C-alpha cells in the first residue's frame, strides 16, 4: 500500500504534471518534424520503392501545391513515428506513480512490446502487403476495347495508399497487447476469447475492409494476420495463466513457512 500512498499528490499537481508531460511530447514532435522536413524527399524516396519494384516509374501531381503538401505529410508521419518512444515514455512517467509495484511490473512489458509490434506490422506492410497489392492493382492496365489503360498515380494518392497500409498494419499488430491488457484488467476472460473466435474472424475482416483499399487481396493480407495474432494472444494468455498457477502454490508455501 505504501508504494501508492507515498506518490499521492493534489489534483493541481496532477494537472501540472500532465502539462509537463504533454509539453515534452509536443516538443519531441516539433523537433522530429523539423528534422523530418529536411529529409522528407529521401523518406518519400524510400516509400516509393515498392512502386518502383512493381514496374511503375512515374508519379504525377496535378495541383500546384500537391507535391509540397505531400512533403509536409511525409515529415509529419515520420515525426509521429520517431517521436512515439518519447510519447510512450512520458505516458509511462505520468501513469507509473499511480500504480502499485506489481502493477508496474505487469504494465511495463506491454509498453515495451507496443513499438516492437507496431514496427513489425509496418515492416510487413512495406515489404509484403504493399508490393502484393500494387502488383495486383496495377495489373488492370493494358488494352481495354482498343483503348490503352495506363496507371498514372498521383503523389498524394500514393502517399495516402502507403500510409494507410503502414499505419493500418502497425496498429492492427497491437491486437495481442490490447487483448492481454483487457484480460489482465478482468474485462474479458480466456474462455470468452476462445468462445469468440468466429466473431473475431468477422471483426478481423471488418477491420481489414476499413484499413485497406477495397480489394479482396489487400483485405486478406491484413485479415489473415489479424486472425493469427488473435490466436497468439490466446496462447500468450494461457501461458501466463499456467505461470500464475505454478507460482501461487510456491508463494503460499513460502508464507506458511
Image (cartoon, rainbow, N blue to C red):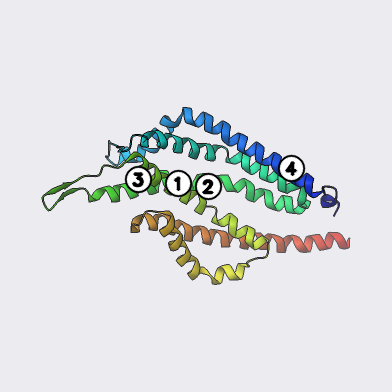
Rendering quarter of residue 16 = top right
Residue 10, above or below 65: below
Q: Which residue is mark 3?
A: 131
Q: Which mark is residue 166?
A: 1
Mark toward the start of the polypeptide (1 vs 3): 3
Residue 8, above or below 196: above
Rendering quarter of residue 27 = top right
Seen at 44% across and 63% down, the residue is 206
Q: Nearer the viewer, mark 2 or mark 4?
A: 4
Q: Which residue is mark 2?
A: 118
Q: Label 4 vs label 3: CA separation?
A: 45 Å
Extreme-right residue of the structure: 257
Judging from the image, what secondary structure is the residue with disc 3 in?
helix
Mark toward the start of the polypeptide (4 vs 1): 4
Task: Report crowding for label 3: few under 14, some 14 to 19, many 20 or more residues within 10 A (C-alpha).
Answer: some
Q: Nearer the viewer, mark 4 or mark 1?
A: 4
Amino acid at each position: 500500500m505504501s508504494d501508492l500512498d507515498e506518490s499521492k499528490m493534489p489534483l493541481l499537481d496532477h494537472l501540472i504534471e500532465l502539462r509537463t508531460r504533454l509539453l515534452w511530447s509536443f516538443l519531441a514532435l516539433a523537433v522530429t518534424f523539423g528534422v523530418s522536413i529536411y529529409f522528407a524527399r529521401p523518406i518519400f524516396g524510400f516509400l516509393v520503392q515498392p512502386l518502383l519494384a512493381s514496374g511503375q516509374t512515374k508519379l504525377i501531381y496535378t495541383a500546384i501545391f500537391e507535391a509540397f503538401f505531400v512533403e509536409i505529410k511525409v515529415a509529419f508521419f515520420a515525426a509521429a513515428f520517431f517521436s512515439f518512444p518519447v510519447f510512450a515514455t512520458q505516458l509511462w512517467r505520468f501513469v507509473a506513480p499511480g500504480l502499485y509495484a506489481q502493477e508496474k511490473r505487469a504494465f511495463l512489458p506491454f509498453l515495451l512490446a507496443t513499438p516492437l509490434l507496431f514496427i513489425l506490422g509496418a515492416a510487413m506492410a512495406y515489404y509484403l502487403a504493399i508490393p502484393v497489392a500494387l502488383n495486383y492493382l496495377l495489373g488492370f492496365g493494358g488494352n481495354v476495347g482498343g483503348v490503352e489503360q495506363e496507371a498514372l498515380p498521383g503523389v498524394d494518392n500514393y502517399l495516402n495508399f502507403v500510409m494507410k497500409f503502414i499505419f493500418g498494419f502497425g496498429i492492427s499488430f497491437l491486437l495481442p497487447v490490447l487483448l492481454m491488457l483487457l484480460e489482465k484488467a478482468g474485462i474479458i476472460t480466456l474462455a470468452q476469447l476462445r468462445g469468440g473466435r468466429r466473431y473475431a474472424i468477422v471483426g478481423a475482416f471488418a477491420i481489414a475492409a476499413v484499413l485497406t483499399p477495397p480489394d479482396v487481396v489487400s483485405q486478406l493480407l491484413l485479415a489473415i494476420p489479424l486472425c493469427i495474432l488473435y490466436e497468439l494472444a490466446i496462447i500468450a494468455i494461457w501461458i501466463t495463466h499456467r505461470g500464475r498457477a505454478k507460482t501461487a502454490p510456491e508463494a503460499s508455501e513460502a508464507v506458511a513457512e
